[in-house]
Amino acid sequence: MDTVAWPWTALSGFGLGLSLIVAIGAQNAYVLKQGIQRRHVLAVVAICALSDALLISLGIAGMGALVERAPLALVVLRWFGAAFLLSYGLLAARRAIWPTALAPSAQGGGSLTRVVLTCLAFTWLNPHVYLDTVLLLGSVANTHEGGRWAFGAGAIIGSVVWFTVLGYGARLLAGVFARPLAWRLLDGAIAVVMVTLGLRLVLA
C-alpha cells in the first residue's frame, strides 16, 4: 500500500469507528457511571477497548461472513442480551425511585470481579456490537484491500480514545454527583436507556 495513503485510510477508520461507538448505549452508560464513581476505571476501559480491537480484527480477518452464516447465534445473543439489559434497567430504576439506596456510601461500583463480569456482559451479550464491528467495520475495512489493516487500526485507536476519555473524563462530573439527587437522575436515565434497548432487542 502507498505509504502516503495509509494515514488517510487510518483516519477514515478512526472516523467511522467513533461514529459507531459515540452513541447513547448500555456500554457507554456503564463506563460513564464507573468513571464518575472512580471504581475500576482502568479495567472497564481496557475491557471495552480490547473487546472492540478483537472484534474489529476478526471482522477484517473474515469472521463477518461466518457470523452472517450463523443467524441462530445472534438470536440467542439477542435474547440473553435483552434479559440482561432489562434486569439491569429495572435495578437502576429501583435505585432511582428509592433515594435511601443512593447515598454516596452506597454508590460503590462493586468488586473488581463483579465489574469485569458486568462490563463483559454489556459488551459481548449485545448483538449490535457484532453488527457494528465484525460486519460493518470489517466489511468497510476490506474495501480498502491493502489498506484494510490501516483502516482497522484507525477504528481501534478511535475506540481506545473514546473509552479512555469517557472513563477518565467522567470524574470531572464528580462534584455534580456528590448530591444524591444527581445519582437518582443518572440512574433514572440509565434505566430508560437499558429498558429501551432491552425492549428493542425483544421486539426486533
Image: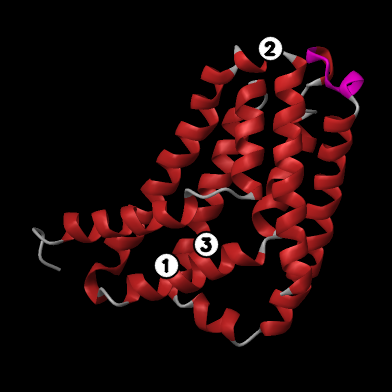
Q: Nearer the viewer, residue 9 or 88?
A: 88
- Residue pointed to by mark 3: 55
Residue at the spot 72% in from the left edge and 29% down from the top edge: 185
The correct choice, above or below, for 103 with respect to 23 in the image is above
Foreground pick, 32 / 151: 32
**What amino acid is labelled 2 in the image?**
Ala
Q: Nearer the viewer, residue 34 or 160?
A: 34
Residue bearing mark 2? 178
Q: Magenta span covers which residues? A: 99-104
Is 156 part of what is drawn in magenta? Answer: no
Instruction: Find out whether the residues at labels 3 and 2 contact each other: C-beta distance under 8 Å.
Output: no
First in residue order: circle 2 vs circle 1: 1
- Counting residues from the start of the chain, the first of labels 3 and 1 encountered is 3
- Examine the image and state in which quarter residue 183 appears: top right
Q: Which comes before the other along the chain, label 3 or label 2?
A: 3
Q: Quadrant of residue 149?
A: bottom left
Residue 154: where, in percent of width, then height? 32, 53
Q: Which of label 3 and label 2 is nearer to you?
A: 2
Q: CA distance from mark 2 to mark 1?
A: 39 Å
Residue pointed to by mark 1: 137
| Residue 181 horizontal/vertical position (percent) | 75, 19
